Image: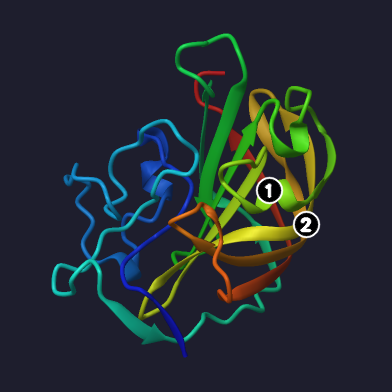
Amino acid sequence: MYRRRRGTAPLLACTLLLAAACGSDSKGGGDDDGGDDGGGDDGGGDDGGLADGGPGAPDASVPVDAEMEVDCPDGNLGALGALANGLGIQEPFDEADPKGAQVRLLAGDFGEDRIFQLALVDQRGAFEGTAVVPGTYEIGEAEASLTTCGACITLGLTTDDAFFGMLPTAATLTLDAVDTNVTGSVTGLALQEEDPATGGLREGGCTATVESLSFDVVIAGS
């Protein structure tokens, strides 16, 4: 058994265009109507930071500071196949500099209990010193935190008891295209649960592995 906060969904911030693919029906988050602007774990407002809270809201019947004992999800996920229900958008990393570093955001799922998000951020993490371009990238330490990642992979796993936001600790990311479509694959993906307080890894958190997955998502407006 693992002690964690109920109802939190610590994923990458979702834009309105990605909301449909960002787990608004998460079992672990209770009823998420997106109407709470009070901050905390509600997953509503996006302040432009990659480490913002993700989808999901606390179950109204459970205090937001309550913790419960739940089992970690089955972490042996195997080959997930092709991403379904993909949505994507490109936007400036800094709204004050619209022609500067860009972020390509995409989201989708591998079934209703496996929500996937990928943000590709110019000049950060795996793309330090360069714009995002096709190629093969080894996911390292920088990608294990939403505050430093450039190839920001998150996978949300929903069980009957809770929602688990997972970050990569190792993977190989291959990008075949990044213009009108973001197309590529991830292999050898190792994941660990995110700590929503830091945007990094939760010490002693749940883990998971994915043999492979692929994605081909149109970037809206490109």
The residue that appears at 57% across and 82% down in the rendered structure is: 74
Residue under label 2, please give it. 171
Q: Please indicate whether residue 155 sits to the left or right of residue 208 in the image.
A: left
| Residue 120, placed above or below residue 42 | above
Q: Quadrant of residue 77?
A: bottom right
Query: Disc 2 residue type?
Result: Ala
Residue 143, which numbered label?
1
The residue that appears at 81% across and 31% down in the rendered structure is: 134
Location of residue 78 in the rendering, given as x and y in whole percent from the top left corner: 71, 73
The residue that appears at 38% across and 56% down in the rendered structure is: 23
Q: Quadrant of residue 95?
A: top left
Coloring applied to the structure: rainbow
Do labels 1 and 2 touch, CB within 8 Å? yes
Residue farthest toward the bottom in the current orientation of the protein: 1
Crowdedness near tag 1: few (<14), some (14–19) or many (≥20) residues, C-alpha within 10 Å? many
The residue that appears at 35% across and 36% down in the rendered structure is: 46
For this rendering, which residue is in front, 153 or 37? 37
Q: Please indicate whether residue 1 sits to the left or right of residue 26 in the image.
A: right
Element carrying mark 1? helix
Location of residue 163 in the rendering, given as x and y in whole percent from the top left corner: 41, 69
Location of residue 175 in the rendering, given as x and y in whole percent from the top left corner: 77, 38
Quadrant showing the C terminus:
top right
Disc 1 versus disc 2: distance between alpha carbons? 10 Å
